[in-house]
Image: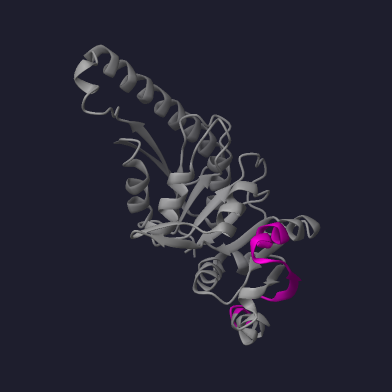
Amino acid sequence: MIKDLVVNLGQQDARGPARDFAISIANAFGAHLAGVVFTLVPEFPGYIAPALRPDILAKIRSHSETAAQAAIDRFDTASLQSEVSREHRTIQATQAEAPLVLAALARRFDLSVFMQSEPNVVDNDAMIETSLFQSGRPLMVVPYIQKEGLRLDRLVCCWDGSRAATRAINDALPLLVKAAAVDLLIVLNEKTRGAENEIRGDEISRHLARHDVRVQIEKTTAEDIDVGNAILPYVADRSASLIVMGGYGHSRLRELILGGVTRDMLNSMTVPVFMSH
């Protein structure tokens, strides 16, 4: 079950699609909601910092604190209207520290909620990527154009038999159980040809049925580089309201960076995406 969740409250995000979507999740599950906003500590190279006047640094801090308080006020107003159990936290950190701090905090919650990065307005990529790979918890990414709250009329689960896809479907069970319809979408390509038993979807479908989740298996074909372009049209054609998928990454000098499909989905998403790694 989803008993508590945390939402990242961006200072520049006055419209609050992630905030409002998180409130709708909390309402649906009777869950506790924590809103988190960062006041960013100024960070400059060592050769610049000594030349900065103290009053300039104070103004930067003050501006960030004012913006953070405005985000908290918007969160309190929106959540008060829905009467959800709630709290807010203001955390001081540098721009570089904030993603890791939030990922560590997210380990104490069932789900974290983020807004998709909005070009030239809000850059949440580092927050999303770090929480995906470092929190050990699932996350929900909400399109910056999102206006509706949580809808569970039709969910699309992306299945390729991988560890990440398995983790995502398992973590999403509280949503799947409540859904009116669930599609198990299998994109056939070069990478899936050697996993015929899993790719048929029979075993995972039977497993989900034991959890009272009835799925409809759907298949489509696409080249590896076009998997994202195969998923999004399917979601639109079926008027689905949510995507469940594994969050994939590649190791690079002990770091994980987003895989191509994951990156494409986060860039082009049209409905909320529930994701686990």
Q: In the figure, residue 261 lies in which quadrant?
A: bottom right
Residue found 49% across the figure and 60% down from its top? 2
Residue found 77% across the figure and 55% down from its top? 236
Instruction: Magenta stretch: give its range.
Output: 208-231
Which residue is nearer to you in this view: 251 or 211?
A: 251
Q: Position of residue 175 (x, y in %)?
A: 59, 63
Q: Position of residue 111 (x, y in %)?
A: 46, 56
Q: In the figure, residue 155 lies in which quadrant?
A: bottom right
Residue found 69% across the figure and 55% down from its top? 241
Q: Residue furthest right?
A: 237
Q: Residue furthest left?
A: 50
* Residue 153 appearing in the image: no
Q: Say left or right for 57 vs 157.
A: left
Q: Position of residue 124 (x, y in %)?
A: 48, 41
The answer to whether residue 211 is magenta is: yes
Q: Position of residue 6 (x, y in %)?
A: 44, 49
* Residue 67 appearing in the image: yes
- Is 60 drawn above or below residue 233 in the view shown? above
Q: In the figure, residue 20 lies in which quadrant?
A: top right
Number of numbered tags placed on the structure image: 0
The answer to whether residue 140 is magenta is: no
Q: How is the image coloured?
A: one colour
